[in-house]
Amino acid sequence: MENTTLGGALKGPGGSLVPLLCALGVSLGAVGFGYALGYSSPALPAMQGDIFRDLRCDDDDSEAVASELASLWSSMVNIGGVVGALSGGEFLERFGRKGTLLYVSAPLTFVGWAWTSVSSTPSEVIVARVVVGAGVGLASAAVPVFIAETSPAKLRGRLGSLNQAGVTFGILLVYAVGYALPHSRRDYDCGQHVKSIHPSGWRLLARIGAALALALFVVCAAYLPETPVWLATRDPAEAERARRRLRGGGGRVVDVEDLGRRLLLEDAQDQDESVSGGERDDDDDDFRAEDEHADDASSSSQTTQRQAPAPPPPPPQNDNNDQQEPA
């Protein structure tokens, strides 16, 4: 019976907390993505009448509504996100999965949030919003690839869900912080009293976004390894060190193909581990033995067929199934 619990997968044969910790660390990028998506909801009411001063009233002059510039600013994170996501493939191949987060995504996101927190004109916050979107768009491309390439097969599905969990947590975080900030009432020209977060609250929310980007940078620089899959074709020795750090195990990898076979074999072994402490069914053992020795068996069979003489024909038998005496 296969061990299907997360705790059992981590404590079982070959289990390790390292892939889990790596997935949790890199999920900070997903949290930042969700935070950027949800930022406009608590921030926009405070920005009305502050940085967006051209408020207008609705048709019956009873309520103040956001200006066109404010609506444009809110949507700019999606424009930046599209640019970041579409360019993510090139960055992932050029700089690696960790490198994309460390050298491109986290710095871009940090700069965008820091710029937002000190902006004084609508054009500044709009451009800064695009920069934030590009940074988190790159993170949305890098995070799931990193988790998939560093997680063993027995944990890959569970750890892969941390990406989307991080996005939803980031949205919840910015909503909760926005709600907890001090509130005040302000009067607009149309005479409607509008309750919103404190006028300076949107800058504080932006600083928290910058702190999340800085945390991702520190985690990447101090802890996360690059994925063995990306390193395999560039630095096999470093790829082997990364593999051992993530999955443990001995043996010496001599080339890229050997590393690939090692990773695939470890995935197959992870799938076969059972609750009883590593016991496997006879069918699994036969399959593994056949897989490991298929080439040797095929070569030995061909050699035997070339060298061994043809076997003699079986002796004839009489009607009573007794062996016939030789003449």
Image (spheres, rainbow, N blue to C red):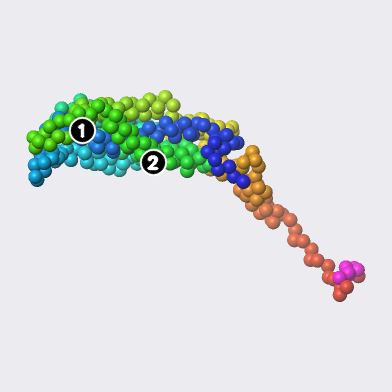
Crowding at dot 2, Cα within 10 Å, few <14 / some 14-19 / many 20+, comes out as some
Would residue 326 be found to the left or right of residue 255 on screen? right
Residue 230 x %, y %: 43, 37
Residue 160 x %, y %: 44, 41
Q: Quadrant of residue 107?
A: top left
Q: Tell me the residue that label 2 is attached to.
A: 164
**Could you tell me which residue is drawn at 28 percent across and 38 percent down?**
37
- Report the Cα–Cα distance between label 1 and label 2: 30 Å
**Could you tell me which residue is drawn at 43 percent across and 33 percent down?**
24
Residue 272 x %, y %: 59, 44
**Could you tell me which residue is drawn at 30 percent across and 35 percent down?**
175
Residue kind at label 1, given as amino acid type? Ser
Residue kind at label 2, given as amino acid type? Gln
Would residue 190 be found to the left or right of residue 287 on screen? left
Marks 1 and 2, the one that precedes in the sequence: 2
Q: Tell me the residue that label 1 is attached to.
A: 196
Residue 38's disc is none
Q: Quadrant of residue 94?
A: top left
In the image, residue 60 above or below residue 136: below
In the image, residue 262 above or below residue 296: above
Q: Quadrant of the C terminus?
A: bottom right
